[in-house]
Image (cartoon, rainbow, N blue to C red):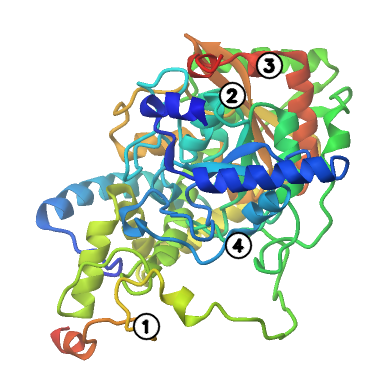
Amino acid sequence: MLARIGLDEAETARIGVELEKILDHISRLQQVDTSALTETAQVGELVNVMRDDVPEPPLGAAAALRNAPRSDGHHFVVGAIQANELDA
Amino acid sequence: MAHQKRVEPQLHAYLTSTTELAEQQAEAAALTLAEHPDSASPLCGIPMALKDVLCVQGVETTASSKVLAGFRPPYTATAVQRLFDAGAVCVGKTNCDEFAMGSSNENSAFGAAGNPWDVERVPGGSSGGSAATVGAGVVPYALGTDTGGSIRQPASLCGVVGFKPTYGRVSRYGLIAFASSLDQIGPLALSVEDCALVFAVIAGHDPRDSTSDPSPVEDPQPALGRGVDGLRLGVPREYFGAGIDAGVRGCVEDALHVLEAQGARLREVSLPSTEVALSTYYIIAPAECSSNLARYDGVRFGLREEQPSLTDMYLRTRAAGFGDEVKRRVMLGTYALSSGYYDAYYRQAQKVRTLIAAEFASVFESVDALVSPTSPTVAFTMGERDDPLSMYMCDVVTLPANLAGLPGISVPCGFIDSLPVGLQVLAPRFQDARVFQVANAYQRATDWHATRSPLADAAA
């Protein structure tokens, strides 16, 4: 559900087996003693990269909407969100 | 472009041909060369191709995914713009594994590219189309991207040179993201010199990518002629171990003797965490991909499968738009990041990443560069590796460099049954020039890179 991919039953079964095999392999990672190690999220040495707050011309609505599956010329158009909250 | 048309039905290296753009750029380049022949870039007027994960304004860019079919980016990637500014002539967008996830090109939603040495075999991946078209003699260079070996491995399998720069050296602005802490753009070409020429143009700081490094880029040109006399080259024991084909090992050992004869001092070294690098990568890369690919939700661009409720629209759009490998990685990533498993998988993988980077740093205290095979095997047959895990093994000696952010290259170093073998050279972070130094010393002493594929010969 977290992945937001709607699989049918046959796909769920097949991918489930494949993922189990992959997880089984990568679980060997648990055997490494990491008690003295810190985490690496990125290898770059840069932190808190800042820039001057200077306004630049924006992309513009027309360009931003050009690839939209549905729009009204000013906005992206989607189905009702609330109906779906009630479903859940 | 005539040669492109001739070999394309067999090779399928391109998803889009940009004939009109190429003609415009060629005319502009001709003008530049006529008016300013002395100040023109060496790349001015030279044809090239771009992996289809790199955005070009107004040109269909799909990342080989159905979810992005028809997508025309509103802007151009920085690395691409720099080449265009230098006068490059873009002939097309190349085939690749969907969202750059794969090692054979078979994960392309639009059908795999072939290998120019044997079209029944895979070109490698994920930058398979870029490697195939260079290997087939259609363009002298192409851009690819490397997240776990996706430039070096296809270069090895197609008998061309493929260079992955230091993480942070080339801006990722305009690159469709797979795993942001690992992705890097780089060239595939017929020689080390050509890779260095392209690298010099695309490298350098870009304020639009906050991970791009502001330090000055070392000019790779002087390093090309420096040779390896006195250089200390480490041979990682683990990179020659189980899983490496005996023939590949033999070719690479011969290459090491060539470097030794040039004055390099070889020393066996150990990177003990290599055996868990694959597991580390297959947690970190899917975790980052699951986050990056959350944007394909059918709202702002790409495919939408209409449904009455928004959640159902998300579920159907992503089920219809993504191929199997992308689905597996997104699910693996969300699993590794979910609250119950975060510590056991994602946090643990991040800690082991620290260990892997530290082992490289420690080895580089006593050697100047590392040499090894690029790929455990030569190009395999289409459909031969139908099990995801066996496909992941293709990258076992390339992906540790991505985890540590190192620069690396693959250069042709022999053949097994007329299929190319690659030699990998790795160096410390920001020592991109040293990678070129070692690779070019090898290339000057050998002529493997000058051997042309059957499809390239068809050009003559």
Chain letter of the residue beneath label 3 in the structure image: B
Q: Which residue is mark 1?
A: A73
Disc 3 residue type (three-letter)? Ala
Residue at coordinates 66% horizontally, 38% vertically from top-left? B408
Q: Which residue is mark 4?
A: B173
Residue B249 seen anywhere in this rendered image of the structure: yes
Q: Residue furthest top?
A: B417
Q: Which residue is mark 3?
A: B255
Disc 4 residue type (three-letter)? Tyr
Q: Residues within 10 Å of mark 3 (few under 14, many from 20)?
A: many
Q: Compare residues B46 and B239 and report the one nearer the observer.
A: B46
Q: Which residue is mark 2?
A: B422
Q: Compare residues B297 and B231 and report the one nearer the observer.
A: B297
Q: CA distance from mark 2 to mark 3?
A: 10 Å
Q: Position of residue B99 (x, y in %)?
A: 42, 51
Q: CA distance from mark 1 to mark 2?
A: 52 Å
Quadrant of res B253: top right
Q: Compare residues B342 and B244 and report the one nearer the observer.
A: B244
Dot in front, 1 or 2: 1
Q: CA distance from mark 3 to mark 1?
A: 61 Å
**Quarter of the figure with the C terminus of chain B:** top right
Q: Position of residue A74 (x, y in %)?
A: 39, 86
Chain letter of the residue beneath label 2 in the structure image: B
Disc 1 residue type (three-letter)? Gly
Disc 2 residue type (three-letter)? Gly
Task: Answer above or below: position of B82 versus B265.
Answer: below
Residue at coordinates 23% horizontally, 79% vertically from top-left? B310
Left or right? Give the position of B376 relative to B266. Answer: left
